[in-house]
Image (spheres, grey):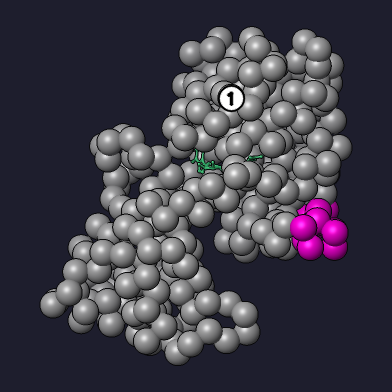
């Protein structure tokens, strides 16, 4: 079974412009699709550090990248710990960084992970299955959140992370239901959401946004992204590029804003004799508009439909 079909792979390599002998970081190495192409492009001496929060992804990548030997270092870690990881490898600067956000097809398709409403499984949704204390700030599974969060908190999660218009109605139903029946499985939750929103319309399952929201909350995905982008940029060499693939508007907005903020210099009024704000641009935006997948790729891999690639270069 394919672990994961990487999206926008040619575009990522074209944009990253790997240099022979360069050192690259893949912050979300997954099934190593992008990592392999980057390694090929920076060969025969170039190196890659691959991180993934999920131990299974690291194991899969280790097998898939075996041909590259010592040119690859794989580390199981949340990419918010990038600085610690790079320091431990004595790396002080890198030539390029890739983020391919979200979950892999393997994670999504495995019922035991709880990411999909189409497969019966526990409401887990943690990216890593390490003991809870090492997982994120909350260390909670989706089931923990559904069991303990109050009405307002649940509604906030569905509204903010799922952009779900009926967030409060769904939260109310969850709070009422859990009084007598514990919410334990993905299909149970999917049915509950469907009972509030009605059946599927417009090709999107009614539970899609609630599942997305819970996944984001469980893994603090948006917080991680903001911190990860910041650290990755700090480690980039001058002319080095950062390439980020996002899959929904909340992520894309964060990437876009981050690039705009980092590519904006002094904002002092022009009549001030000297700069008082101290802002300096550190990035140049390479992709004014995000790069998206072509028709053929979307036909072959429907997951590519929502992918957006944004790239910036360190000044
Ligand atoms: C879309 S997949 C990456 C696929 C990969 N580019 C490939 O070609 O196979 C996203 C990966 O990011 C990992 N991930 C998500 N959040 C992470 C985080 N905060 N730190 C490290 N890895 C993370 C997931 O475990 C998953 O394996």
In the picture as drawn, the residue positioned furthest to the left comes out as 180
To which quarter of the image does residue 184 belong? bottom left
Is ligand 1 closer than 8 angstroms to the Cβ of mark 1?
A: no
Residue beneath the point at 68% across and 46% down: 5
Q: Is residue 247 above or below residue 236?
A: below
Is 83 left or right of 190, judged from the image as shown?
right
Residue projecting furthest to the front? 1
Q: Position of residue 16 (x, y in %)?
A: 80, 34
Q: Secondary structure at mark 1?
A: helix
Counting other residues with Cα less than 10 Å from the Cα at mark 1, is it few (<14), some (14-19), or many (20 or more)?
few
Q: Is residue 143 left or right of residue 79?
A: left
* Residue pictured at 31% horizontal, 64% vertical: 185
The quadrant of the image that shows the C terminus is: top right
Q: Locate residue 193, reporting x and y percent.
A: 39, 79
Looking at the image, the residue that sits furthest to the bottom is 198
Q: Is 158 in front, or is 202?
A: 202
Q: Nearer the viewer, residue 162 or 29?
A: 29
Residue range (magenta): 288-300
Towards the viewer: 269 or 155: 155
For this view, does 258 lie left or right of residue 12?
left
Quarter of the picture for ligand 1? top right
In the rendered image, which residue does mark 1 sit on? Answer: 63
Looking at the image, can residue 136 be seen? yes
């Amino acid at each position: 079974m394919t672990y994961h079909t990487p999206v926008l792979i040619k575009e990522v390599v074209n944009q990253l412009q790997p240099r022979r002998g360069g050192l690259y970081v893949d912050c979300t190495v997954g099934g190593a699709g992008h990592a392999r192409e980057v390694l090929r492009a920076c060969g025969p001496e170039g190196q890659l550090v691959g991180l993934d929060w999920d131990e299974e992804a690291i194991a899969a990548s280790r097998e898939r990248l075996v041909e590259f030997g010592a040119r690859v270092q794989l580390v199981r870690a949340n990419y918010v710990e990038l600085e610690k990881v790079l320091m431990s490898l004595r790396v002080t600067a890198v030539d390029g960084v890739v983020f391919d956000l979200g979950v892999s097809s393997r994670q999504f398709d495995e019922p035991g992970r709880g990411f999909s409403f189409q497969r019966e499984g526990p409401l887990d949704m943690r990216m890593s299955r390490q003991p809870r204390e090492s997982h994120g700030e909350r260390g909670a599974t989706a089931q923990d959140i559904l069991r303990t969060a109050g009405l307002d908190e649940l509604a906030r999660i569905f509204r903010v992370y799922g952009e779900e218009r009926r967030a409060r109605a769904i939260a109310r139903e969850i709070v009422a239901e859990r009084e007598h029946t514990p919410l334990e499985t993905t299909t149970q939750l999917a049915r509950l959401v469907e009972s509030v929103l009605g059946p599927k319309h417009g090709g999107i399952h009614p539970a899609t946004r609630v599942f997305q929201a819970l996944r984001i909350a469980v893994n603090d995905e948006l917080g991680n992204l903001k911190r990860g982008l910041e650290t990755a940029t700090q480690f980039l060499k001058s002319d080095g590029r950062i390439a980020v693939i996002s899959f929904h508007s909340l992520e894309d907005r964060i990437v876009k804003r981050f690039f705009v903020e980092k590519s904006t210099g002094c904002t002092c009024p022009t009549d001030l004799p000297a700069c008082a704000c101290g802002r300096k641009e550190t990035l140049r935006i390479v992709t004014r508009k995000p790069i998206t997948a072509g028709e053929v790729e979307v036909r072959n891999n429907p997951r590519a439909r929502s992918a957006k690639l944004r790239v910036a270069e360190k000044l």
